[in-house]
């Protein structure tokens, strides 16, 4: 779809390499990592992750999801790209030593740690606008001032037990475009200032769409586009390299999700290709 929309005229679209073990271990517990890779994960954790059917290919799939986010991080910080993304990832429900909610490992944390190890980055801003709270990321970085976690999410939704992000903005179920966008606008800009982040990680889940069956917000496709624009403008103004990750989307039919995700990446490329900010 992105090729059909002409995105590859201005951006490279590449296959994701598998994530290196050393990168995974920057953000995750070694026993949890080896249990997953060796196929001996506690069945209760596998149930919490919820991927079905659980087959051997989950390992390859998971490593490629993480590897895509790491490759995009290198494209930004080592390759000089202003924006890069992963058409997967945004696996924000994974904690250091357990997975949950379709997330095995946390690619946001792995990307932030690769940025720290390889590029000395110590001011990361996570902008998590998936409809579900970024609980895994919040917990991993609860006591780490170098990664600021910001989450706007539906208050009455998974996860039942929320973690504490550096800034949480819960919005009530049924919130539509106007209420959502003003809640976001009220807090967004100061997060990019004094001092500006050296890396922005945007979890761009589109499960706030009205057609989404796990979302419980009433956002339109246009509302989500306005949301994306707010983030890209703020990042552009701050001159911050921006990593865009897919996040959730469960519309019925699924085409609504796919179109809205196409917008996320198409807008990212357009926003950073112009000098108009
Ligand atoms: Zn979600």
Image: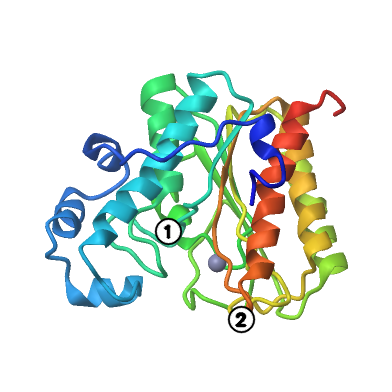
Residue shown at 65% from the left, 76% from the top: 212
Residue shown at 54% from the left, 56% from the top: 165
Q: Relative to 21, is 63 above or below?
A: below
Assess disc 2: are there few (<14), some (14-19) or many (≥20) residues with their C-alpha within 10 Å of its C-alpha.
Answer: some
Tell me the quarter of the picture where residue 18 sits: top left
N-terminal of the two: label 2 or label 1? Answer: 1
Q: Position of residue 4 (x, y in %)?
A: 68, 47
Q: Position of residue 198 (x, y in %)?
A: 58, 27
Element class at badge 1: helix
Choose between 264 and 239: the one closer to the eye. 264
Ligand 1 location (quadrant): bottom right
Residue 153 visible: no
Determine which residue is flagged by label 1. 136
Q: Could you tell me how far apart the alpha carbons at marks 2 and 1 are, in whole angstroms?
A: 22 Å
Determine which residue is flagged by label 2. 213
Question: Which of the labelled discs sits on residue 190, or is there none?
Answer: none
Tell me the quarter of the picture where residue 101 sits: bottom left
């Amino acid at each position: 779809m992105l090729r059909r929309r002409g995105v590859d005229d201005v951006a490279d679209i590449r296959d994701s390499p598998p994530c290196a073990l050393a990168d995974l271990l920057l953000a995750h517990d070694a026993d949890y990592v080896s249990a997953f890779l060796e196929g001996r994960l506690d069945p209760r954790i596998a149930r919490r992750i919820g991927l079905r059917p659980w087959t051997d290919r989950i390992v390859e799939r998971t490593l490629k999801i993480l590897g895509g986010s790491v490759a995009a991080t290198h494209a930004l910080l080592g390759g000089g790209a202003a924006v890069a993304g992963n058409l997967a990832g945004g696996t924000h429900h994974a904690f250091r030593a357990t997975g949950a909610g379709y997330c095995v490992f946390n690619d946001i944390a792995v990307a932030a740690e690769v940025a720290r190890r390889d590029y000395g980055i110590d001011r990361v801003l996570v902008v998590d606008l998936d409809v579900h709270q970024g609980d895994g990321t919040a917990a991993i970085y609860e006591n780490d001032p170098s990664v600021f976690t910001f989450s706007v999410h539906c208050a009455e939704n998974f996860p039942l037990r929320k973690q504490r992000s550096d800034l949480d903005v819960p919005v009530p179920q049924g919130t539509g475009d106007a209420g959502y966008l003003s809640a976001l606008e009220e807090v967004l800009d100061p997060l990019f200032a004094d001092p500006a982040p050296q890396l922005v990680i945007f979890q761009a889940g589109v499960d706030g769409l009205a057609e989404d069956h796990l979302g419980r917000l009433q956002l339109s496709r246009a509302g989500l586009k306005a949301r994306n624009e707010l983030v890209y403008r703020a990042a552009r103004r701050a001159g911050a390299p921006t990593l865009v990750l897919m996040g959730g989307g469960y519309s019925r039919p699924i085409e609504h999700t796919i179109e809205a995700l196409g917008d996320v990446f198409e807008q990212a490329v357009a926003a950073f290709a112009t000098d108009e900010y």
